[in-house]
Image (cartoon, rainbow, N blue to C red):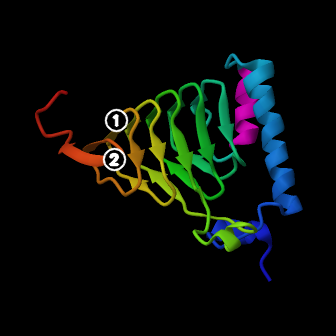
Amino acid sequence: MKTEKEKMLSGEPYLASDEVLVSERLKAKRLLHQLNVTEYVVSGNARSIIAELIPYAPASLYIEPPFHCDYGYNIVCGENVYFNVNCVVLDVMKVTIGSRVLFAPGVQIYTATHPLNYETRRTVENAKPVTIGDDCWIGGGAIICPGVTIGNRCVIGAGSVVTKDIPDDTLAVGNPAKVVRKLNIEGSHE
């Protein structure tokens, strides 16, 4: 029989109130408190806290506090990822971020979702992974919904709500976000 954590990580309905999951979220909250309140300025100690909170990220990950996440260990980053202030990553399931990705202030990434049936929703939740490719820029206040994949070299406009996959080399804006044009056309220096 699967544990609630195993169910959570595989996208199955799970009990968020499971004592192991509650304990792991509490550990993340303690580290976030240190990062967001005690340290606040990204220094050597703050970098140690980030490394403990997000163990599957290189030392080049830069987080400008305050920052919020559920677990931290479900966030996997490439090199030179930058989170500006007030970003939220609900990492109930894996969030994969490529290299050289820039997050403007207030970006929110959600993997957590809930059943549509109200009776089921009373007891369980579930999640879908999020993937963001290399060399992306996610504009301020953008929301990336569960199960979305954003391709390489994309720009997501400020305030956009990304509900569906975004192909490589595109600019997507709006609510819901829609691709408005191709980017990185050969010879272009936008």
Residue 84 visible within the image: yes
Which residue: 69% across, 73% down?
Answer: 120
Residue 21 at x, y percent in the picture: 81, 58
Magenta segment main secondary structure? helix
Relative placement, left or right, of 71 versus 169 is: right
Residue 57 in view: no
183 horizontally vs 15: left or right = left
Distance (Cα) linking label 2 and label 1: 8 Å
Question: Whole-percent x and y of residue 17?
Answer: 82, 60
Q: Residue at x 71, y 37 (%)?
A: 51
Q: Within the image, what quadrant is residue 55 found in?
A: top right
Amino acid residing under circle 1: Gly
Q: Which mark is residue 177?
A: 2
Q: Is residue 46 magenta?
A: yes
- Most foreground residue, 118 or 109: 118
Confirm or deny contact between disc 2 and disc 1 (CB under 8 A).
Answer: yes
The residue range painted magenta reads 44-54
Is 14 situated above or below 159? below
Seen in the picture, residue 50 relative to 181 is either above or below; the reply is above
